[in-house]
Image (spheres, rainbow, N blue to C red):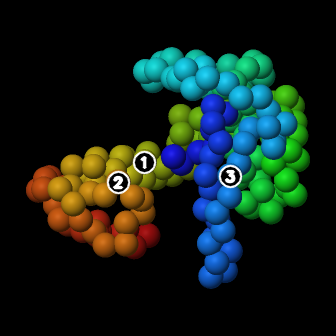
Amino acid sequence: MDELSLSAPTEVAALSGQEVRTFTVTPEEAGLDRCAAEALKGGDAAENAAIAREVLAGEPGPRRDVVLLNAAAALLTAGRSESLREGVRLGREALDAGRARELLDRVRGVLADERGYPGLGEILARTRERVRCEARSPRSSGSWPRRRPPARADPSCGPWPPPTDPT
């Protein structure tokens, strides 16, 4: 699993220097209630987008809580909070104040309007093509970024690494 769960304890392995420490995290440690895994289930792209809008709008419930729990873990890892409880509090403040929604709106604005960002459309197109080619590679492990390029199964994907623009 790549995220903390509200439906069960989560086993975590944390690297600190040369030492790996393992421990268990529960939602209760962060001040959150457990829920059934079914309460967190998403759907297709449209349904998942609606869920994200609900969370960003402050809709209470398990979906918001799982976002808060994982945001708390990220804040703790980044040294921005001292505990999961504090991270949940900070995440809740960001959602309730609309800061998370504002950030998403700014990113969407940049992606939708490249006039102020010359070349952004081309960069995004190249990135999409690279991801498409990576996914079609027979040696693709799904990890990103990859240290060594995979063998190309699709000749339309071109050379690896892609040529860089000197400008």
Determine the residue positioned at 68% across, 52% down. 24
Q: Write down the residue under mark 2.
A: 142
Mark 1 or 2 closer to N-term?
A: 1
> What amino acid is labelled 2 in the image?
Gly
Question: Considering only vertical position in the picture, is 103 above or below 163?
Answer: above
The kind of secondary structure element at disc 2 is loop
> What amino acid is labelled 1 in the image?
Leu
Q: Write down the residue under mark 1.
A: 124
Among the 4 quarters of the image, the one containing residue 134: bottom left
Viewer-nearest of discs 1 and 2: 2
Q: Which mark is residue 31?
A: none
Q: Write down the residue under mark 3.
A: 24
Viewer-side residue, 66 vs 121: 66
User: Taking 41 as reference, is 21 left or right?
Assistant: right
Question: Considering only vertical position in the picture, is 79 above or below 131?
Answer: below
User: Taking 159 as reference, is 109 left or right?
Assistant: right
User: Taking 130 as reference, is 38 left or right?
Assistant: right
Image marks 3 and 2: residues in contact by CB distance under 8 Å: no
Among the 4 quarters of the image, the one containing residue 90: top right
